[in-house]
Each structure stands twice: as C-alpha cells, then as structure tokens.
Amino acid sequence: MLWDPKYRNVKGHVVEYIHRVNDKIIIKKAKLDNVEEIGSWYFVVKLGFDRKIIPFHRIVRIIDNEGNILWSKTYTSNSKPKRLI
C-alpha cells in the first residue's frame, strides 16, 4: 500500500498497531498524516512532542478516513497475541 498511487496524498487514514506495556498489549492508533519517516522495517510517527518507531510487524489494521478497513493482519493459531486489550 505504501507505493500504490491511489493511496498517495490521502488524508485521514489511520494505522492501528500493537503497543506493549509491561505484560499488557494495547492497540494504539496513529494518523498517517503524522508519519514522518518510512524505513525498510519501520515507520516513525509523531505523537505530540514525541516520536515513536513502529515496526511493520506490529501493524494490525489500516483504516481509511471513512472507516473502511483497507488492510488487516491475518493471524494463525499460534501467532495471535495473548493478553490483547
């Protein structure tokens, strides 16, 4: 999706990703408008005054500005995170 021309310059899309806090797994959201950098295995998102590096394997879903799911991670029986909040 990163290099597909129909998704270039689109505003309002959201990336949902896994964030770990101690033994809990939380799904966080980041607007694609706040993505500052895309690397080979990660993207950097600006959250207020902070910057977070998010590895691609932590992305759970990508949602467009109308709420449609553009992409969703497929889990196998042994890859689904436990303790998901």
Image: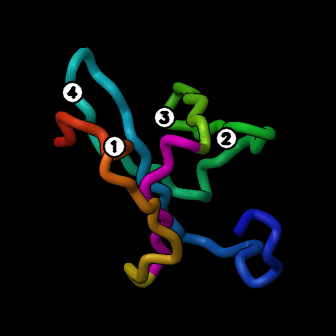
Pointer 2 or 4: first along the chain: 4
What span is colored magenta in the figure? 57-65
Quickly name the residue at label 3: 48
Quickly name the residue at label 2: 43
Instruction: Give the alpha-carbon distance from disc 3 to disc 4, as whole Å.
Output: 23 Å
Q: Is residue 8 magenta?
A: no
- Which residue ends up furthest to the front in the rendered image? 77
Quadrant of the rendering where the N terminus is positioned = bottom right
Question: On screen, 67 above or below 12?
Answer: below
Estimate how packed mark 4 is, as few (under 14), some (14 to 19) or many (20 or more) residues with alpha carbons within 10 Å.
few
7 displayed left or right of 56: right
Quickly name the residue at label 4: 24
Instruction: Residue at 66%, 75% (x, y): give it.
Output: 10
Nearer to us: label 3 or label 2: 2
Instruction: Give the alpha-carbon distance from disc 4 to disc 1, as whole Å.
Output: 18 Å
Query: Quarter of the image holding residue 85?
Result: top left
Nearer to us: label 2 or label 4: 4
71 displayed left or right of 44: left
Quickly name the residue at label 1: 78
Query: Quarter of the image holding residue 40?
Result: top right
Is there a contact, CB below 8 Å, between mark 3 and mark 2? no
Pointer 3 or 1: first along the chain: 3
Check disc 4 and give the amino acid type: Lys
Check disc 2 and give the amino acid type: Phe
* Rendering coords of residue 77 (x, y %): 31, 51
What mark, if any, has residue 34 been given in the picture? none
Q: Is residue 62 magenta?
A: yes
Q: Secondary structure at mark 3?
A: loop
